[in-house]
Image (cartoon, rainbow, N blue to C red):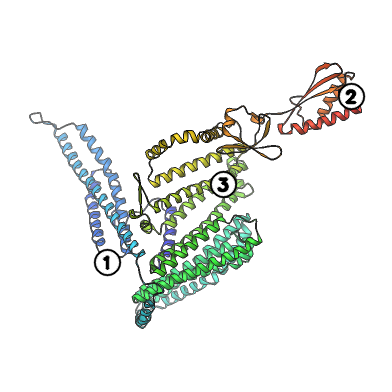
Amino acid sequence: MSSLTIFQRLLLVVAWVTLTAAAPAPAPSPDVAQVPAPADAPRFGKMDARLDKHEEALRAIRRAARNKSADDAALRAQAAAIEPIQADLADALSTLTPRLQNTRERLDELGPAPAAGQPPEAPDVAEARARLLKQQSSLEGNSKRARLLAVEAGQLSEQLNQRLRRNFSERLWEHSRSVFDPTLWGDFAAKLPDDLRRASDAVIGQTPQPAAATAPGATQLWSAVLAALGLFLLVPARIILGRLGRRWSVAYVPSSGLRKSALALWQTLVGALTPLFAGLLLYSALTSVVRLTPAIDGLARALIAAVFYAATIDALGRSLLAPGRPSWRLAPVSDAFAARVAALPAIIGVAVGLAMFMARASVLLDVSLPASEASRCLGVLLQILAVGSALALARSGAAKQDEADDEGPSRLPWVLAAVIAWLALCAALIAVVTGYVALASFIMGELVWIATVLACLVLLMRFVDDLCDALFASRTGLGRVIAAATGLSDHALEQIGVLLSGVLRLGLMVFGWMAIVAPFGASAQEVFTRATSTEMAFKLGQLSISPGLIFGGVVVFAAGMVITRIVRSWMETTYLPKTRIDVGLQTSITAALTYLGALIALLTTCAYLGLSLSKIALFASALSVGIGFGLQAVIGNFVSGLILLAERPLKVGDRIAIGDQEGDVRKINIRATEIEMGDRSKLIVPNSDLISKVVRNVTHGGALGQVKFVLRVANDADAAEVRKLILDQIAANPGVLRDPPPSVYLTNVSDGALDFTVVAAISSARQATGIKSDLLFALVAQLKARGVKLAA
């Protein structure tokens, strides 16, 4: 892998963001003539020349592509030159097509030409017909030619991509000598004097010449200024800018969360860009006074790229860990753990940068093959040792942190990341031991690149969340301005901020995925070709299954379920709590989202495996009998659960009664519903029972609760006085509603007893037992105090 590959990736990512944000449309190629919109026939006079130019350019690209010695850079340049040609051909076709249609319509309006023996048409009509026929012929010829050139450009682009894929595969699976092969180091030692002499000739023997015969004083002064600025940016400016960023965030950023994330982003940019600009300034200062040889120029550029990438890794790590400053830390780790692993980003950055520079230097200095192989082996081993030592040290620190804090955040993502990193390290080590040094270099480069992209995503997502929360909060100035201008409530502003944060996070995830897979390009499939080859596949009917296909299907389904889980968690914990939707409807929304995500993941997996709907239907029909008998109850409960979520006769939080059982609905699952009883036990009710049987929803539709009981007193008591006493006690209880008013009825007069039926409305059925108990306690005490006896 080229030593400038990672540097080029970062520059391409920055350039892509800049161009898509600033440029409303791609600029035309400078090699393509600017063609104004044709409003009349004279403006088409340059169309033939325009197509001739594209045809000649495609012919030249084809000749260059046939060169067997062309490297990947030349092939990519030829492929990039095809894109503006294709864009201009598409623009030409979009111009020619409506013009040709207009010409045909005008000819149809003139009608057919007079047949032989018929009177001739008017001279002006004949002249117009001839002019339109000539124009139609020219437009049709140009349209056919443009289409043919577009097809040729597409075919040529595909050929170049295939050749790039083939070159990538050949380099990736190129077998060389193992790092433990004694002949490698013997040949390296034998060729070392010649390599040193060759390097000396490239760097020292070819003395750089002055940029001009006599460098003016102004040029020397300007070179000195550039060198001074470069040295200033290299160390002092980083310290000064870091302190200024901390002071500015404390003074002007109101939100504590935004203050931390903004400062971390600022320190990352300062730590990564100041070495880059310092290197560019020093390079400009050097080239302004001397003319560099190709070897020295290449070494200088390689050194700038290596330092930039190493500084980026170190700045990202220090910004997230913030060693010694726990109040500014974004990573969920303890202060002891952060201090323990504080040096790891710098170690990894130095190892990767040094490996990049060594690989590039071996090419620029034209060293021997043993020296090149040895430098690549040493570079890969250096990266493996650095990353392996970092993982081991991080694991040791993580174990101590787990002992100190057993109730911290879930460590499952970190464990999975560590397992993947260890597997990649083992694969790279096996590759370099067995002689596949290029494969090992590719694995380590991608491992570090993916880790860098993920660290950037963590930082940017945290910054986006904090920024949206600060901008759309009612406590901030901008939030108050937006609320005053739009009349939105605080809840509405919070919802807008959460939705905007979600959209931006989704955009960052898409951009991060593009950045991760961009280095693979069209050649990523070559890495997995051997695992998915037809030699390792077996047939299951018309379906071809291979280990790579099965693994890919599992990964696709797992990714779909993980994305569904993330979206559901975001809806449950972030967005839905900001709305005024009741808890039951929130649960229904998240459950429906889970079902929908699982269905989409299943369909996507089937599409990846090549299972069409007809094949799925055939497979389902074969199992329909078994499903009909064996899974009838399960399917019935599943469908009943969907009906419960759609019709919502009951929802989470409702109090329902089934027979003599009464409790609160806590969860509606796929098969059954959980009901919490008064003793905190769970009653599991199949969903089909809730649909087919009589269920009383005590709290449905905001229903009121009711207290009802019968009070029996002796028949010698004054009925009016007892009624007044009951009403007074009901009025004294704050839990009884005044509307509708309570009622006391004398429902029975029997031998020796008077029966008073008491009915009172309360705000919630859940309070019925407690309020009834309070009323009976108060009534019994008052009746005894007044000498009124209860009937036997």
Residue wearing tag 1: 69
Q: Determine if residue 746 is in view.
A: yes
Measuring 49% from the left and 40% from the top, which residue is drawn there?
Answer: 596
Determine the image quadrant of residue 182.
bottom left
For the residues labelled 1 and 2, the Cα–Cα distance comes to 115 Å
Mark earlier in primary sequence (1, 2):
1
Q: Determine if residue 292 is in view.
A: no
Q: Is residue 238 left or right of residue 53?
A: right
Q: Is residue 383 left or right of residue 575?
A: left
For the residues labelled 2 and 3, the Cα–Cα distance comes to 61 Å
Name the amino acid type tagged 2. Answer: Lys
Mark earlier in primary sequence (2, 3):
3
Mark earlier in primary sequence (3, 1):
1
For the residues labelled 3 and 1, the Cα–Cα distance comes to 54 Å
Please provide percent x and percent y for residue 63: 23, 61
Q: Nearer the viewer, residue 41 or 357?
A: 357
Q: Secondary structure at mark 1?
A: loop
- Check the picture and name the quadrant holding the N terminus: bottom left
Name the amino acid type tagged 3. Answer: Ser
Q: Which tag is nearer the camera, tag 3 or tag 1?
A: 3
Residue wearing tag 2: 789
Asked whether the residues under the numbered discs 1 and 2 touch, taking CB atoms below 8 Å apart as contact, a structural biologist would say: no
Residue wearing tag 3: 569
Q: Which tag is nearer the camera, tag 2 or tag 3?
A: 2
Please provide percent x and percent y for residue 4: 40, 67
